[in-house]
Image (tube, rainbow, N blue to C red):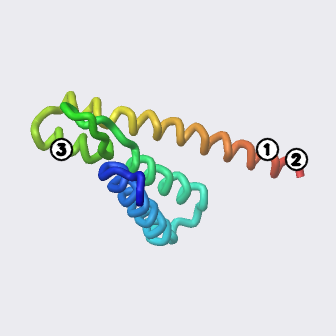
Amino acid sequence: MSDLNGATSVWVLYSVAAVAFVIVFWRWIDFIQSRSLRVVLSCSVLVLLVSPVAVPGTDNLAPAWLVALFELALGRTVVAQNAIRPALIILAITYAVLLLLLLRKLYLRRQT
């Protein structure tokens, strides 16, 4: 009937919930006048929510923030730092792409 295994189903459900949260978050920060700032904040939340990382000692993936929080609770700060690092790299790439899009928008506006 379905080719999805348990872990994939959980990730699909989690991703849908994360996108729904970002939509609610977008409405919550509606008071911010700058649309660009709202986009940056929403993208940051989405990246931090859905960036996967390998769970130490298993073959499973989990959200990086959750693994880092769990490892911090266990007192393993080095493992927590290693868990959150991929999310921070993806966040930096996201900011670079958003900056390029903003510069393109400003360039095109300047030409017209």
Look at the numbered disc 1 and give the secondary structure of its residue.
helix
Return the x and y of residue 65 as percentages of the image width and height. 30, 45
| Amino acid found under the numbered disc labelled 1 | Tyr
Per the image, the residue denoted by label 1 is 107
Look at the numbered disc 2 and give the secondary structure of its residue.
helix
Q: Residue at x 57, y 66 (%)?
A: 33
The reply to whether discs 3 and 1 touch (Cβ–Cβ < 8 Å) is no
User: Tag 3 or tag 2, which sits nearer the N-term?
Assistant: 3
Per the image, the residue denoted by label 3 is 70
Q: Nearer the viewer, mark 3 or mark 1?
A: 3
Per the image, the residue denoted by label 2 is 111
Residue 1 in the image: above or below residue 70: below
Of residues 65 and 15, the one nearer the viewer is 15
**Residue 112 as seen in the image, left or right of residue 21:** right
| Amino acid found under the numbered disc labelled 2 | Gln
Quarter of the rendering containing residue 67: top left
The reply to whether discs 1 and 2 touch (Cβ–Cβ < 8 Å) is yes
Query: Dot 2, crowdedness within 10 Å: few (<14), some or many (≥20)?
Result: few
Which corner quadrant holds the N terminus? bottom left
**Residue 42 as seen in the image, left or right of residue 11:** right
